[in-house]
Amino acid sequence: MPVDAFVAHTLLEALAPDRIAIAVAAVGQLQEEARQLDKQWGLRRERARYEAERARRQYDAVEPENRLVARSLERAWEEKLRTVEAIEQAYERWRREEPLVLSEADHAALQALGEDLPRVWRAATTTAADRKRLLRFIIKEVALDQKRERGQVWLKILWQTGTTSEHAIQRRVHTYRDYLDLEPLRRRVEALNASCKMDKEIAAVLNREGFVAARGCAFQGGNVWLLRQRWGIATVKINGVSANPLRWADGSYSVQGAAAALGITPQTVFDYLSRGLLIGRQLAKGQPWQIDVADEQLERLRPRVRHTRRSRKEAS
């Protein structure tokens, strides 16, 4: 399907109104050149006929008894006639190969074709067989090779004009081993990860930038996670790969810092965060917590912590 879509796009692009206008202008230039050549052919043919007629008159003017001169003039006349015939044959061959002559009506019809073809091509009433017939008017043959380049389908289009064009499109692959842009993909994932983006965010950026996952699908967070594991790219935290400090540079607490300040476990800090007893933020999912705890908030929470400890002792 991607190959069919690409060939159709190439056809419509080749027959776009601006392309047709350029082609018609080129044909007009060729026609002017052909007219100049036709004039030259006309002069050459006229000269050959004149030489042949002159040779005939010379032959007719010779005295019959002067046989030696007559035979010489006859051979010269025959040679001139052969030259006329050869030039006429060459002229006819050139006429058959000269550019197509387009009238003003032809120009207008071609422009209308360029404007109408996309609409006709995409119309719901146009069948696949209709599209194939349209293609065959313009394209003679399409050759494919899926093994010439990794992750690509190579195409050669033979147009009805006799010219060819070569193209390559990315093909669907089953493994990243056959992926076309694997190294650019790895570098982009590495750069996005280094900017502290999470896997889902990286996937969204890759999709926007036109990267396609294996099997031709869009990237998701899971794809990015698997690729990071394969390439050994660790999630970059706001503090790099170091352990979380008790307090961050902006004065906020880490989970470990809040736990130490309140004398509770990190799990209890997560519980307080979920219940709204502590307010914190993450730059992105998977990044360390930055918890804002003012001194008065610590004073309010410490009685709760002491009460929780007494309750646990009594229960034990």
Image (tube, helix red, strand yellow):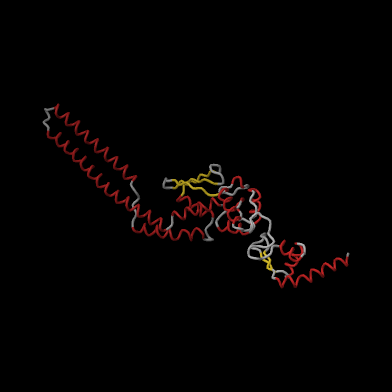
Relative to residue 79, is residue 202 drawn left or right?
right
Foreground residue, 178 or 256?
Answer: 256
The answer to whether 256 is drawn above or below residue 168 in the figure is below
User: As drawn, is 5 to the left or to the right of 80?
Assistant: right
Residue at left 19%, top 34%?
A: 77
Whether residue 212 is visible to the viewer of this picture, yes or no, is: no
How many discs appear?
0
- As drawn, is 214 to the left or to the right of 46? right
Quadrant in which residue 50 is drawn:
top left
Q: Height in image: 161 above or below 286?
A: above
Q: Is residue 36 visible?
A: yes
Residue 39 x/y as whole percent? 24, 47
Give whichever of 65, 207 is nearer the camera. 207
Q: Nearer the viewer, residue 77 or 164?
A: 164
Q: For residue 108, what is the image quadrant?
A: bottom left
Quarter of the picture holding the C terminus:
bottom right
Question: On screen, 176 above or below 54?
Answer: below
> Residue at left 56%, top 44%?
150
**Where residue 132 sits in the image (x, y, percent)?**
51, 52
Spot occupied by residue 182 in the image (x, y as percentages of width and height):
58, 48
List x then y, in percent, for residue 124: 54, 61
Q: Is residue 285 above or below residue 155?
A: below
The residue that appears at 44% across and 45% down in the rendered structure is 164
135 or 51, nearer to the observer: 135
